[in-house]
Image (tube, rainbow, N blue to C red):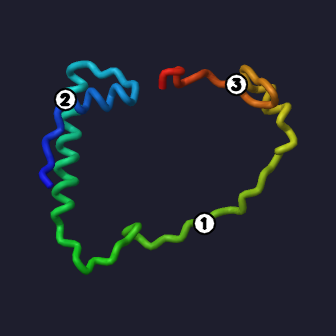
Amino acid sequence: MAIEKLNRDAVENVASLAKLELSDAEADMMTDQLDKIFDLVKMLGEVDTEGVEPTYTPVQTQTVLRDDVAVNAHESDALLANAPESEANLIKVPTILDEGA
């Protein structure tokens, strides 16, 4: 399957979907950078990995986790007192997506 080069229209379309505004210089820069990243990914796809066992990390480490224990759960009034706005025992936050999203 042939991979075509990333073009500026595709970058601007993705930026629009992500609700990002890019200047002409930023769109050109992102097009160039993303195209280079895709070239590197394509190069990695050409590496012969036959017989290589998959790994998740190059270093074998063990994550030390503490028990997940709720503390001070009964102090919601004190928490809500620090919030700028609250309603129905919840913290109100500004809307980040409009109705058209």
Q: Is residue 69 above or below residue 30?
A: below
Q: Secondary structure at mark 1?
A: loop
**Of residues 58 and 36, which is closer to you in this image?**
36
Q: Position of residue 35 (x, y in %)?
A: 18, 41
Q: Residues within 10 Å of mark 3 (few under 14, many from 20)?
A: few
Which of pointers 3 and 2 indicates the residue nearer the eye?
Answer: 2
**Of residues 10 and 36, which is closer to you in this image?**
10
N-terminal of the pair, mark 3 or mark 2, is 2
Q: Is residue 21 left or right of residue 73?
A: left
Q: Position of residue 32 (x, y in %)?
A: 17, 35
**Which residue position is annotated with label 2?**
8
Task: Check if mark 3's residue and mark 1's residue have beta carbons within 8 Å.
Answer: no
Q: Is residue 87 left or right of residue 20?
A: right
N-terminal of the pair, mark 3 or mark 1, is 1
Task: Check if mark 2's residue and mark 1's residue have beta carbons within 8 Å.
Answer: no
Which of pointers 2 and 1 indicates the residue nearer the eye?
Answer: 2
Give me the residue at 37% from left, 69% from top.
58
Give me the residue at 80% from left, 49% from top.
71
Q: Amino acid at mark 2?
A: Arg
Q: Quadrant of the N terminus?
A: bottom left
Q: Is residue 8 above or below residue 42?
A: above
Which of pointers 3 and 1 indicates the residue nearer the eye?
Answer: 3
Q: Is residue 87 left or right of residue 60?
A: right
**Which residue position is annotated with label 3?**
92
Q: Amino acid at mark 3?
A: Lys
Q: Residues within 10 Å of mark 2 (few under 14, many from 20)?
A: some
**Which residue position is annotated with label 1?**
64
**Of residues 40 and 75, which is closer to you in this image?**
40
Q: CA distance from mark 2 to mark 1?
A: 45 Å
